[in-house]
Amino acid sequence: MTRPAHSNLESPAPQAQPQPFRLDNRHALVTGGASGIGQATVRELVRAGAFVWIADINLPAAEALANSLVSAQVLHLDVTSPTSIAAAASRLTRLDILVNNAGIGHVGSIETTPPEDFDRLLNVNVRAVYLVTRAFLPLLLASQINPDNNSHAGTIVNIASVSGLVGIKQRFAYCTSKGAVIAMTRQLAVEYPKTLRVNAICPGTVETPFVEGYLEKFHKHNKEEVRAELRARQPIGRLGQPEEVASMVRYLASEEAAFITGSLFTIDGGWTAA
């Protein structure tokens, strides 16, 4: 049998496929980046190829994290202080990804929540998101993946909560604040539909220092009992992990999510589906 004339030619080597959800040459900033979901997000964005600013009021913790990574730098930031935010913003010349993660919790009904506690929750969880986003907005709007075709890359991921989607007993101020974060997310998405992508992640209860602090402060006498209750209210039967939220941040910041804006993503073990 006569062989085809080309049979002695070697097949071309297969081209290596690019890894998905890469963030190479992107600059990110994560508020509250030194612990919990923020720390996991910093690590994940660096792993994806981004340079990350670890913005936190806890400078020693932020520095310890930065020293363990190849492309991260510390940014001392009090998200409630316009002066601190302005000083931080003056250090940056470029920003492609902003993750508004810093926040605090609170336990109490409307009857047991004093005005000063309510104001503090709104100051940290809502006003700070406004202040930080407003300060870094010019850099985000200037962000471009490809200047030749005017492709914009500015991305905001807000860490909200299932508490902004459903009512939870004894969480009056917290539910109020996270509902506001969700509203801000949607408003920004429609205000800048062609120049900025803005989405929110709504975690359930995640195993973080944030939750441990809540247990220690409010349930020191029955910590393990309440921990079991927190697991049980999520149908999957466990607490979430910070890395699971961080993976969603990475996806939403990537080009694979280029058609997604103004959306909410629950990571809650089925809580809001039940």
Image (tube, rainbow, N blue to C red):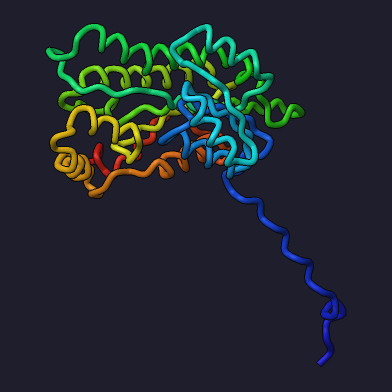
Q: Residue at x 62, y 28 (%)?
A: 153
Q: Could you tell whether 229 is left or right of 240 in the image?
A: left
Q: Is residue 274 something that shows in the picture? A: no
- From this view, report whether residue 156 is shown above or below residue 68: above
Residue that lies at the very extreme toward the bottom in this rendered image: 1
The quadrant where residue 123 appears: top left
Q: Residue at x 16, y 24 (%)?
A: 170
- From this view, report whether residue 62 is shown above or below residue 270: above
Q: Is residue 33 something that shows in the picture? A: yes
The quadrant where residue 76 appears: top right
Looking at the picture, tell me which residue is in the foreground, 137 or 59. Answer: 59
Picture coordinates of residue 119, whole percent (x, y)? 30, 9
Looking at the picture, tell me which residue is in the foreground, 33 or 234. Answer: 33
- Quarter of the image for the N terminus: give it: bottom right
Picture coordinates of residue 133, whole percent (x, y)? 51, 16
Q: Could you tell whether 110 is left or right of 145 in the image?
A: left
Q: Residue at x 56, y 27 (%)?
A: 29
- From this view, report whether residue 240 is shown above or below residue 87: below
Residue that lies at the very extreme toward the front in this rendered image: 60
Picture coordinates of residue 38, whole percent (x, y)? 45, 33
Looking at the picture, tell me which residue is in the foreground, 93 or 35. Answer: 35
- Quarter of the image for the C terminus: give it: top left
Residue that lies at the very extreme toward the right in this rendered image: 5
Picture coordinates of residue 25, whole percent (x, y)? 68, 35
Looking at the picture, tell me which residue is in the foreground, 182 or 54. Answer: 54
Q: Could you tell whether 161 is left or right of 69 in the image?
A: left
Q: Could you tell whether 230 is left or right of 258 in the image?
A: left
